[in-house]
Image: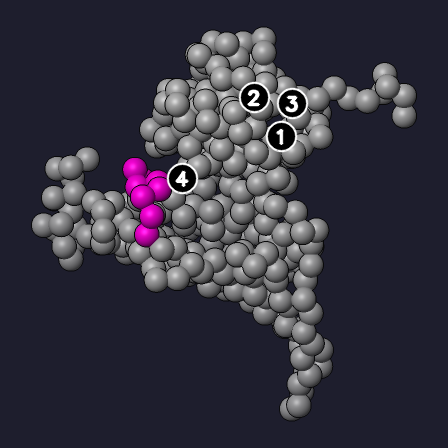
Amino acid sequence: MSAAAVPRRIRVAVVGTGEFGRNHARVYRELDGAELVGVYDQNRQRAAAVAAEFQAPVLQSLEELRGRADAVSVAVPTIAHAEVGCRLLEMGLDVLVEKPMAVDLTEADALLEAALRNGRILQVGHVERFNPAVRAVEPILNRPLFFEVHRLGVFTPRSLDVDVIYDLMIHDLDILLAMVKEPVTEVKAVGIPVLTDKVDIAHARLEFAGGAVANVTASRVSTERVRKMRFFQQHEYISLDYARRDALRIGVKKLGPQPEFGFEKLNAPAVEPLYAELETFVQAARTRKEPPTNGAAGRAALELATRVMASIQEHAARVQPEALAAREKTT
């Protein structure tokens, strides 16, 4: 290939240099198709530390991104996603915004409208879609009808500005919507605060239009870290471990009085999910092809998370009205 045929690198920047933003900067430095042209954070000391670690300029304002960058990762607190994301989209930049894409559907719609109005790519950071375990099972999906999902984590001070539904469970809601590809017709959920004034542990039962059912549990007050999904389809049981990034397929090879079973470990390229996610974003910025976790997918996951939260609040109003009233006073 001649030098003239080599595509130029996409100029990328990171806004927000907390834990997520730092990792975005790290991966962008590793991507062949990307050039990290700057980082920005209102916390100048934190921005300077990340910039020094990954040899990138520190930007003094968002306005400096105009003409300097092609695409930007937004890893600021959720409450600022829409404000920052819309501003960057209006500047003509492609945007990857961390999940949840916004605090509510009104702000999510503002992001979608800004992307459409300016002809920009809007991707949402549902990174588990790029987990090798998920990619390994995608080719064998055959109308799964029953799901059991557990996403448990030990308590940390990260992401305490949102309920566990928007912090952890939303990953699995996004994946379920992508796997089943049907509307959710019924949501029943319960959840309670434990160590914060937000919901720290929750369980949801989802029923889809075609009859599939999913039981989803999320907790950030567990004694161990668990990231697992099990689902069942005709003659097969598939188990995914997001943390180990692998999957196991158990199928019926022979029916009858003495059935025979086959076991198969499903493999996909051992790529860091964040690397695959940002590689997809950079490629979308280059080709103008919509990524799988586009703004519409992000909104669908947020809408379902909102329905889960509404069901939790409805349940709380019946069984613990005092706790719900106290929560409403603090929000």
Q: Amino acid at mark 3?
A: Glu
Measured Cα–Cα span from mark 2 to mark 4:
36 Å
Q: Residue furthest bottom?
A: 257
**Residue sitting at x 47%, y 58%:** 227
Q: Residue furthest right?
A: 1
**Residue sitting at x 38%, y 44%:** 167
Q: Which residue is mark 4?
A: 303
Residue 135 in the image, given as x and y percentages of width and height:
64, 51
Q: Residue furthest left?
A: 322
Residue 275 in the image, given as x and y percentages of width and height:
62, 39
**Decide: marks 1, 3 in contact (CB < 8 A)?**
no
Q: Is residue 189 visible?
A: no
- Foreground residue among 272 and 112: 272
**Residue 249: numbered disc:** none
**Residues in magenta?**
155-162
Choose the circle earlier in sequence order: 4 or 3.
3
Q: Which residue is mark 1?
A: 29
Q: Which residue is mark 2?
A: 56
Measured Cα–Cα span from mark 1 to mark 3:
7 Å
Choose the circle earlier in sequence order: 3 or 2.
3
Residue 308 in the image, given as x and y percentages of width and height:
34, 48
Q: Secondary structure at mark 1?
A: helix
Q: Secondary structure at mark 3?
A: strand
Choose the circle earlier in sequence order: 2 or 4.
2
Q: Where the N terminus falls, by quadrant?
A: top right
Choose the circle earlier in sequence order: 1 or 3.
1
**Residue sitting at x 50%, y 9%:** 64
Residue 140 shown left or right of residue 301 in the figure:
right
Kindly indicate the quadrant of the structure image that contains residue 206. bottom left
Choose the circle earlier in sequence order: 4 or 1.
1
Label 3 neighbour load within 10 Å: few <14, some 14-19, many 20+: some
